[in-house]
């Protein structure tokens, strides 16, 4: 088990390296730079700036320097907000993004799996149809549409919840963004769970379990749940990255101070350091989440461990 | 009408099962009656689709939701069909247990054996963990599973097929049920394992007075096990009676057909006349007259020549061992086949090894799937290849056809070395040599019509043909293999298993090959269909002068079709002889065990005969010293991966070195292949 995890961990290193390299060079292919403003800067200042940020060196040298700093955990300076390093800025926004994203992630898993199991147990019954309808809405409506609708309804009409802002992290401020972010994932996870559960319940070992005289609950929880979760777990990795990218939009709509906002601004301003830093951070997050998914796999299915 | 109903454990009356499907209502079982008394074994026989499994799944309330069941199922006075799920659960697993066909998929993959067994006791008898564990251990030992305590913490995939089925049986017996329903319990297992599982079930029935219902398609298994037989077809009984009645005076045409279709190994006395052993110095072999007739008895072992011949070879230096083996096979084959032009396929010292990871940081080890095999195949000849699962039969077939790259050795096709051929020449060879696989449905492209699948080889090998000419050829071949022309635009899933296998054979025959390899080609088919396909293969062979290599785990099928038979064990040959020689005078202990493990579809014969039981199960090719399983006396001197040498004991009858059979059957408590190193 430990060996398995360790091997997975090692195999993520080349993935990270390739992704960072690609990002670094692709970003430089785009025209313009961090100091190309409306009004051109005097040549001397420009040169000083370039020297300060190593922009006067060859691209390859810059790349080596960046990698070297990265290995020491240094994401480098921001090219625009010169008072802060990239890491400092990320740290400011990070808690908000992680709280919203993490809660949405958790909510999707719990609600999605529960809804899926209910749907499969009451297959073609009323609960199945009700859940199916809600899920369909969650799937087809994009979050930039759902968000304003919910804001209008719960915020302005019913006046139950605030329409935006962090509000010191009060639950009432968090509910709407989390629900908007989680909705499509609740939908997908519950569909996956329902389908997998129906298939598993038709398998031979469930027939054996029934022939042993086990009750319905024991069959679902002990025998059927783990194999059902296999496809669900494999979706969690992509789900996490969708959540992160989704948070860019949701943070903007609800006016939350997460890192999504920094990312968009940085990309528009050619803030190489900031964009790369955010990308590297996202990548590490996604790679780590995928690693957790792989380990979960091994936990779910003993056959994976010995492979 | 039958046995006294009072003592019946299970009494099913007028059972009907209907399925609501997209194609309308399908009646799977029509008015079936079943009675079983305590301690009795009832055989329920029928081919696929006869409703034999559905009957008992319905009785146990295990059918899917789209099934409607009517009738009465009385179990000790209670009508099971009227019980609530809760009441039924108190009976299932406690008083009636079931065993299913495929022990891999029938056990929950992510739960340890111990957990799966203990939950039965904890559900039905509210046992404590400790008591339940104790009881499970005891039952694992009752079904003769070695290292029982260790097995409890293993997962199903870590056990062999035979072990898994034993676990299933132990689990079914935990609460000592009054009735055990076994649905094709040995169909997925090798013959030697099958023999052990059947013995085990028989013994449990005797010891515990459990009534057994054995659902099977195998008349040999019925002959061995059952007191009474009920024959089912299309959801109805066509015949029922005592085992002897059904076997010796079958009334219904279908029963007779079923019995006729079973291949029976018969050895005629004059064919079995004793030839002189090859080594004249030893004089004639001391062989009993009785050995000429099946079944083989373990008391008739000509042990002296074994020992003396082993003396011969063991005195040779070790490094010469493989060279000698080559010489032995090579030279004598040349002598045997007479004119060299006769031989179309010559295989020499063929090896296929696969690297296998045994641990994350452990070094790769080689799995020697095919380990130095050599044989010749004459034009128009049929060579049967027999071996149990994991013996490397299919790998050998694929290596011969160059579908996988042999690691070393030669495959010579009509004078050409196949390993040297370029792409073009290899394609020419592919036209000449075709293969038919086991699963007819899975080996056809599901998105291509039957006609397209059959026309495809023509597009490759005869690109000059136009569409019409191709269709004509396809139509001709369909007629030849007995497929109605109307099926030409159907898809594989719309055809029956037998029809699909005919398509598979027709597709292989389209390029007019000289060699056809059948890899378990009839193993997935019902006996009656199996007989038809074997007949078809023989006809095609006659008509086209085909050479056949017929691979199967089923000795009786191989007997039916082959002229020579090669017996494989862990990737190498243990015995090679003409069919009649092999069955009249099986020499190697492994062959003898195999031959004696095949159930004979004749109740009196089957119950009277002794079976040869060697120690241990079929070993894995990765296991150290597994190849020395039949040479324990020389384990100390030989290297651990030594492959026993073939030598010609009788003219054209090759046998690998081995210890005498007696020494391999005697010491029962220690598995021979485990105590190496």
Image: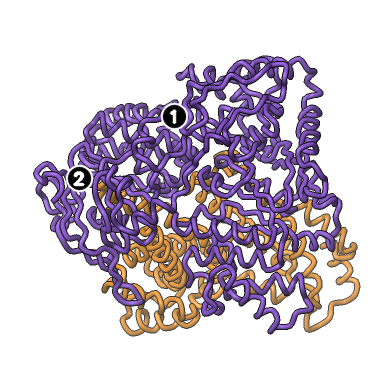
Chain colours: A orange, B purple
Q: Position of residue B401 (x, y in %)?
A: 73, 53
Q: Give the image location of residue B162, x and y in percent.
A: 45, 38
Query: Closest to the observer: B159 or A47?
Result: B159
Label 2 chain ID: B
Tell whether B470 sits left or right of A299.
right
Q: Nearer the viewer, residue B544 or A284?
A: B544
Packing grade of label 1 (10 A; few <14, some 14-19, many >=20) is many
Disc 2 to disc 1, how far (Cα)? 28 Å
Quarter containing the C terminus of chain B:
top right
Question: Residue A145's spot in the image, x, y percent?
Answer: 47, 83
How many labels sit on residues?
2
- Residue B425 bears which disc, if any? none
Q: Chain of mark 1?
A: B
| Residue receiving disc 1 | B611
Q: Is residue A17 left or right of residue B49?
A: right
Who's the residue at 37% across and 41% down the image? B602
Mark 2 / mark 1, whichever is N-terminal: 2
Q: Residue at x 33, y 73 (%)?
A: B21
- The vertical placement of B503 against B287, above or below, is below
Asked if residue A63 shows in the view, the reply is: yes
**Nearer the observer, A120 or B44:** B44
Query: What residue is disc 2 on?
Result: B36
Looking at the picture, does residue B300 appear above or below residue A139? above
The kind of secondary structure element at disc 1 is loop
State whether residue A218 appears in this view. Answer: no
Name the residue rendered at 84%, 63% in the picture: B424
Is B632 above or below relative to B374?
Answer: above
Residue A91 is left or right of residue A102, and the answer is: right
Instruction: Residue B433: give x, y in percent of width and height.
Output: 72, 58
């Amino acid at each position: 088990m430990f060996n398995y995890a360790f091997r997975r961990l090692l195999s993520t290193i080349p993935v990270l390296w390739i992704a960072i390299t690609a990002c670094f060079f692709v970003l430089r292919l785009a025209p313009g730079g961090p100091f190309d403003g409306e009004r051109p800067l005097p040549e001397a200042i420009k040169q000083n700036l370039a020297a300060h940020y190593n922009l006067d060196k060859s691209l390859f040298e810059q790349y080596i320097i960046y990698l070297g700093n990265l290995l020491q955990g240094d994401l480098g300076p921001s090219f625009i907000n010169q008072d802060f390093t990239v890491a400092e800025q990320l740290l400011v926004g990070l808690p908000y993004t992680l709280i919203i994203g993490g809660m949405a992630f958790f909510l999707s898993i719990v609600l999605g799996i529960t809804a899926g199991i209910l749907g499969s147990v009451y297959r073609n019954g009323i609960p199945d149809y009700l859940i199916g309808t809600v899920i369909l809405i969650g799937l087809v409506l994009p979050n930039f549409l759902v968000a304003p609708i919910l804001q209008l309804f719960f915020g302005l009409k019913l006046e139950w919840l605030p329409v935006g802002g962090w509000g010191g992290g009060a639950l009432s401020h968090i509910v709407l963004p989390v629900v908007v972010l989680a909705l499509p994932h609740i939908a997908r996870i519950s569909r996956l769970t329902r389908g997998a559960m129906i298939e598993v319940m038709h398998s031979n070992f469930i027939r054996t379990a029934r022939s042993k005289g086990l009750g319905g609950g024991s069959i679902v929880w002990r025998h059927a749940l783990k194999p059902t979760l296999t496809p669900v777990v494999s979706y969690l990795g992509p789900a996490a990255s969708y959540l992160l990218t989704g948070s860019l939009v949701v943070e903007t709509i609800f006016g939350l101070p997460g890192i999504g906002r920094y990312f968009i601004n940085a990309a528009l301003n050619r803030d190489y350091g900031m964009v790369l830093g955010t990308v590297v951070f996202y990548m590490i997050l996604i790679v780590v989440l995928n690693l957790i998914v792989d380990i979960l796999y091994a936990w779910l299915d003993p056959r994976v461990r010995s492979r | 009408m039958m046995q006294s109903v009072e003592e019946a454990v299970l009494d099913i009356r007028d059972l009907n099962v209907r399925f609501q499907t997209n194609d309308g209502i399908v009646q799977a079982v029509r008015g079936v009656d079943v009675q079983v008394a305590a301690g009795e074994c009832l055989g329920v026989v029928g081919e696929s689709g006869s409703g034999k499994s559905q009957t008992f799944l319905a009785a146990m309330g295990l059918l899917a939701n789209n099934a409607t069941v009517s009738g009465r199922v009385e179990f000790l006075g209670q009508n099971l069909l009227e019980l609530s799920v809760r009441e039924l659960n108190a009976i299932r697993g406690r008083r009636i247990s079931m065993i299913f066909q495929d022990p891999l998929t029938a056990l929950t993959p992510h739960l340890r054996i111990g957990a799966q067994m203990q939950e039965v006791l904890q559900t039905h008898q509210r046992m404590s963990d400790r008591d339940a564990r104790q009881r499970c251990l005891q039952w694992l030992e009752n079904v003769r599973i070695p290292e029982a305590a260790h097995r409890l913490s293993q997962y199903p995939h870590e056990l062999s097929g035979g072990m898994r089925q034993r676990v299933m049986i132990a689990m079914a017996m935990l609460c000592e049920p009054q009735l055990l329903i076994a649905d094709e319990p040995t169909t997925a297992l090798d013959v030697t394992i099958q023999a052990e599982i059947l013995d085990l079930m028989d013994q449990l029935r005797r010891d515990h007075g459990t009534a057994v219902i054995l659902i099977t398609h195998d008349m040999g298994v019925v002959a061995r096990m059952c007191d009474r037989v009920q024959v089912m077809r299309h959801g109805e009984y066509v015949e029922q009676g005592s085992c002897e009645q059904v076997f010796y005076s079958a009334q219904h045409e279908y029963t007779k057909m079923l019995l006729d279709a079973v291949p029976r190994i018969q050895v005629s006395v004059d064919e079995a006349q004793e030839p002189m052993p090859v080594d004249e110095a030893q004089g004639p072999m001391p062989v009993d007259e009785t050995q000429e007739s099946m079944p083989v008895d373990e008391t008739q072992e000509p042990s002296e020549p074994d020992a003396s011949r082993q003396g011969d070879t063991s005195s040779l230096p070790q490094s010469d061992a493989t060279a000698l083996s080559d010489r032995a096979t090579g030279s004598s084959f040349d002598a045997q086949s007479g004119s060299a032009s006769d031989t179309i396929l010559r295989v020499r010292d063929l090896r296929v090894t696969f690297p296998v990871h045994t641990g994350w940081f452990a070094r790769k080890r080689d799995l020697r799937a095919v380990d130095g095999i050599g044989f010749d195949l004459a034009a128009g000849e049929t060579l049967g290849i027999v071996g149990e699962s994991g013996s490397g039969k299919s790998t050998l077939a694929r290596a011969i056809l160059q579908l996988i790259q042999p690691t070393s050795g030669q495959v010579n096709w009509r004078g050409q070395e196949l390993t040297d051929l370029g792409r073009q020449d290899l394609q020419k060879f592919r036209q000449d040599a075709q293969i038919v696989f086991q699963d007819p449905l899975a080996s056809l492209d599901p998105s291509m019509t039957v006609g397209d699948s059959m026309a495809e080889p023509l597009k490759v090998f005869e690109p000059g043909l136009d569409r019409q000419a191709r269709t004509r050829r396809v139509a001709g071949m369909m007629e030849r293999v007995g497929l109605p022309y109307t099926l030409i635009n159907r898809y594989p899933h719309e055809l029956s298993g037998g029809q699909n296998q005919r398509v598979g054979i027709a597709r292989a025959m389209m390029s007019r090959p000289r060699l056809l390899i059948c890899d378990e080609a009839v193993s997935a088919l019902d006996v009656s269909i199996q007989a038809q396909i074997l007949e078809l293969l023989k006809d095609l062979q006659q008509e086209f002068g085909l050479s056949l290599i017929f691979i199967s785990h089923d000795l009786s099928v191989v007997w039916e079709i082959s002229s020579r038979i090669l017996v494989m064990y862990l990737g190498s040959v243990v015995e090679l002889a003409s069919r009649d020689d092999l069955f009249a005078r099986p020499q190697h202990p492994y062959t003898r065990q195999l031959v004696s493990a095949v159930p004979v579809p004749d109740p009196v014969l089957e119950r009277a005969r002794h079976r040869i039981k060697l120690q241990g199960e079929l070993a894995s090719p990765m296991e150290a010293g597994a190849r020395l399983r039949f040479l324990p006396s020389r384990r100390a001197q030989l290297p651990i991966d030594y492959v026993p040498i073939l030598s010609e004991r009788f003219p054209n009858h090759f046998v690998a070195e081995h210890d005498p059979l007696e020494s391999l059957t005697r010491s029962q408590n220690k598995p021979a292949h485990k105590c190496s190193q």
